[in-house]
Image (cartoon, grey):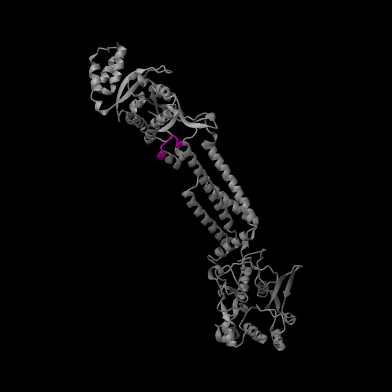
């Protein structure tokens, strides 16, 4: 038999807030709002110092991940270092005549251009040494100058320090060796001076300079002492200490560069933290900084930091990618994809830095991605928690705790609103309840206690068998199977529950008789009638938008209720509908009793009951009796009645009623 097509309830019978389409639409609108909020917040945060420093720190790691090799024609460092101080036998500063010797030695060795990263702003104690140095200076020499910003409450003032005028008069040129540090004290930026030390050195060496954009970032090549470096005393006599042609056609920079590079914690004179300091924890000498700047501007290796529009676009991209990943759902698959996307951001930023010399920090898009993904995950978690709470609260009255837990763990099993499906419905009613109520009209507490003692075990049986309690109607209990969770054996489970309910009534009557005997009063004997029917129903949230219950509607429900009422007319406590009997026949001994027309229906409805397995033997004789009844051949004197009343005691009341109707 094909499964009936599902049919949704009309909109007025559904709870609007619970419709899946509206939940999905509400979630998507919330996700869009979250994306917009994250993009706006991070775009504003990108102007703050902490954000800018985080971007620069990411530059440190990415730019040093696989730094480019040193250019082959880069500068050579002549270091004013510890061995030179020991060899020369003098502490710094040295006589300027010694620097004159060095310049002459470098020229003789073939140096193309010489940069002295030492500021000679004041006359020395020995004026003759200044004259000696001035005599050797020329247009192939750059002397360091300095530019300092002095901030006072009244005004900000730039103070420029240059070499002595007599040095410049001999043809030497001044190059500003000052550098600009980031907010965390790290040197990352190419100085913007038009007459910077490295720029002037490039000019006299004949190297073309690349246009440097404002706030360009410096590409470093390694930690301290990455550049080829010789000691000052070795450069004074290169023929003795250095290979032949070591300085030929090379740019030479002279400056303080200790062999034991100072640590970040200890600090040092004319030493700076660079992006490589995060790995080496060592400062880099200023003379090496100038060499690095020289190679950056002559080979175009500097990094252009992307502007604000590009950063906002990257942030938007990160947020939108996160929205695409969590668009349908969040969970472990989305988390794994997120890890890959975050790694992709870092890889893309590195590739752009290396291949395009443009830096867009992965911090912005990564934070955007994280906040959108994490925010939606948190919202989904809160929604799921609320859904679990609502499901638990709503269905704990109807279902067993185990089934409620299954629904809470997987709400997709719950079709809210209304759907058409095959259910088995059970009605159970107390026989003679009006009489009991009349007898206890002056003692409502005892009546309530009695009803609770009856309905509690019956309800527990329904829940334990996987049924759903629909409602209590006075002394009547209504339940159904196969909703909200699928139950392939719903008919058998309903019949099994009915038999256990009958046993529970016997146990309760035994307790009541024992209590009555102890109290010396007459015991009340309780009886119930049960009707069970299976058929297509509409099940879901029934009621208004303000108040509703999970219930069922349909002709199968009405027939189950009629069967419960008809059970007393057949002398049995349990009547089954035709489809229930067919579905449960493999598990129970089913006996047909009659075909009836119940109130509200015109078609004949076969009715059945359940027999103990011990009474299955004479069932064929019972079938013959029912066939004779349908054929009109049965009469009250038929010998089959006497035989079957003893053979099937469970139907003795039914046979007695049937015989009396035939009389």
The answer to whether residue 398 is magenta is yes
Location of residue 57 with respect to 5 vertically, above or below: below
Quadrant location, the C terminus:
top left
Q: Quadrant of residue 444?
A: top left
Location of residue 460 with respect to 284 vertically, above or below: above
The residue at 47%/35% (across/down) is 415
Q: Residue furthest right?
A: 154
The residue at 30%/12% (across/down) is 662
Quadrant location, the N terminus:
top left
Q: Residue furthest top?
A: 663
Residue 22 % position (x, y): 54, 37
Q: Residue furthest front?
A: 520
Residue 381 % position (x, y): 50, 46
Q: Is residue 240 left or right of 419 when viewed as pictured?
A: right
Residue 521 % position (x, y): 35, 26
Location of residue 376 with respect to 169 vertically, above or below: above
Q: Is residue 518 left or right of 240 when viewed as pictured?
A: left
The answer to whether residue 470 is magenta is no
Q: Quadrant of residue 447?
A: top left
Q: Please indicate, yes or no, whether residue 479 appears anywhere in the rendered image.
A: no
Location of residue 304 with respect to 537 vertically, above or below: below
Q: Please indicate, yes or no, whether residue 566 appears anywhere in the rendered image.
A: yes
Residue closest to the eye, 429 or 401: 429
Q: Quadrant of residue 505?
A: top left
Q: Is residue 484 left or right of 350 when viewed as pictured?
A: left
Residue 633 % position (x, y): 27, 12
Magenta part of the chain: 395-402
């Amino acid at each position: 038999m094909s499964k009936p097509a599902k049919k949704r309830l009309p909109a007025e019978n559904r709870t609007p807030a619970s419709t899946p389409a509206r939940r999905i639409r509400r979630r998507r609108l919330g996700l869009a709002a979250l994306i917009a909020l994250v993009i706006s917040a991070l775009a504003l945060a990108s102007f703050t110092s902490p954000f800018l420093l985080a971007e620069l720190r990411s530059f440190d790691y990415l730019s040093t991940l696989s730094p480019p090799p040193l250019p082959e024609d880069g500068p050579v460092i002549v270091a004013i270092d510890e061995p030179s101080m020991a060899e020369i036998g003098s502490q710094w500063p040295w006589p300027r005549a010694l620097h004159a010797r060095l310049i002459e030695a470098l020229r003789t060795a073939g140096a193309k251009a010489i940069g002295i990263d030492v500021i000679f702003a004041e006359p020395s104690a020995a004026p003759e040494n200044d004259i000696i140095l001035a005599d050797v200076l020329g247009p192939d020499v750059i002397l360091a100058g300095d530019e300092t910003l002095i901030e006072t409450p009244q005004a900000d003032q730039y103070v420029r320090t240059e070499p002595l005028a007599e040095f410049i008069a001999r043809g030497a040129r001044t190059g500003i060796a000052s550098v600009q540090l980031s907010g965390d004290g790290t040197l990352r930026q190419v100085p913007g001076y038009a007459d910077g030390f490295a720029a002037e050195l490039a000019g006299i060496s004949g190297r073309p300079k690349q246009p440097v954009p404002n706030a360009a970032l410096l590409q470093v090549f390694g930690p301290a002492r990455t550049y080829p470096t010789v000691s000052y005393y070795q450069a004074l006599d290169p023929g003795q200490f250095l290979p032949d042609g070591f300085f030929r056609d090379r740019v030479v920079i002279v400056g303080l560069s200790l062999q034991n590079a100072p640590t970040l914690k200890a600090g040092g004179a004319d030493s700076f933290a660079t992006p490589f300091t995060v790995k080496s924890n060592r400062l880099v000498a200023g003379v090496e900084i100038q060499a690095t700047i020289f190679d950056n501007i002559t080979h175009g290796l500097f990094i252009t930091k992307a502007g604000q529009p590009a950063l906002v676009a990257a942030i938007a991209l990160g947020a939108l990618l996160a929205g695409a990943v969590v668009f349908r759902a969040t969970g472990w698959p989305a988390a794994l994809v997120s890890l890959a996307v975050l790694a992709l951001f870092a890889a893309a930023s590195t590739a752009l830095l290396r291949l395009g010399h443009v830096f867009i920090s992965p911090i912005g898009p990564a934070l955007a991605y994280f906040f959108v993904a994490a925010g939606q995950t948190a919202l989904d978690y809160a929604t799921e928690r609320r859904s679990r709470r609502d499901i638990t609260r709503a269905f704990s009255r109807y279902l067993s705790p185990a089934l409620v837990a299954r629904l809470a763990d997987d709400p997709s099993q719950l079709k809210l609103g209304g759907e058409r499906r095959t259910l088995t419905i059970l009605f159970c009613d107390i026989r003679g309840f009006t009489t009991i109520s009349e007898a206890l009209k002056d003692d409502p507490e005892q009546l309530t206690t009695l009803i609770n003692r009856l309905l509690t075990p019956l309800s527990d049986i329904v829940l334990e068998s996987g049924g759903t309690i629909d409602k209590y109607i006075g002394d009547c209990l209504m339940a159904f199977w196969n909703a909200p969770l699928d139950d392939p054996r719903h008919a058998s489970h309903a019949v099994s529950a009915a038999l256990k309910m009958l046993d529970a009534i016997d146990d309760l009557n035994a307790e009541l008789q024992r209590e009555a005997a102890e109290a010396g009063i007459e015991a009340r004997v309780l009886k119930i009638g049960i009707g069970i029917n299976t058929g297509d129903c509409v099940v879901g949230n029934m009621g208004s938008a303000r108040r509703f219950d999970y219930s069922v509607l349909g002709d199968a429900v009405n027939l189950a209720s009629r069967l419960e009422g008809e059970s007393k007319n057949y002398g049995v406590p349990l009547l089954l509908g035709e489809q229930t009997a067919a579905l449960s026949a493999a598990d129970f001994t089913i006996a047909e009793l009659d075909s009836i027309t119940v109130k509200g229906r015109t078609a004949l409805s076969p009715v059945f009951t359940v027999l103990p397995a011990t009474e299955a033997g004479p069932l064929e004789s019972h079938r013959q009796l029912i066939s004779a009844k349908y054929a009109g051949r049965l009469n009250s004197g038929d010998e089959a009645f006497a035989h079957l009343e003893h053979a099937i005691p469970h139907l003795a009341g039914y046979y007695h009623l049937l015989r009396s109707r035939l009389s």
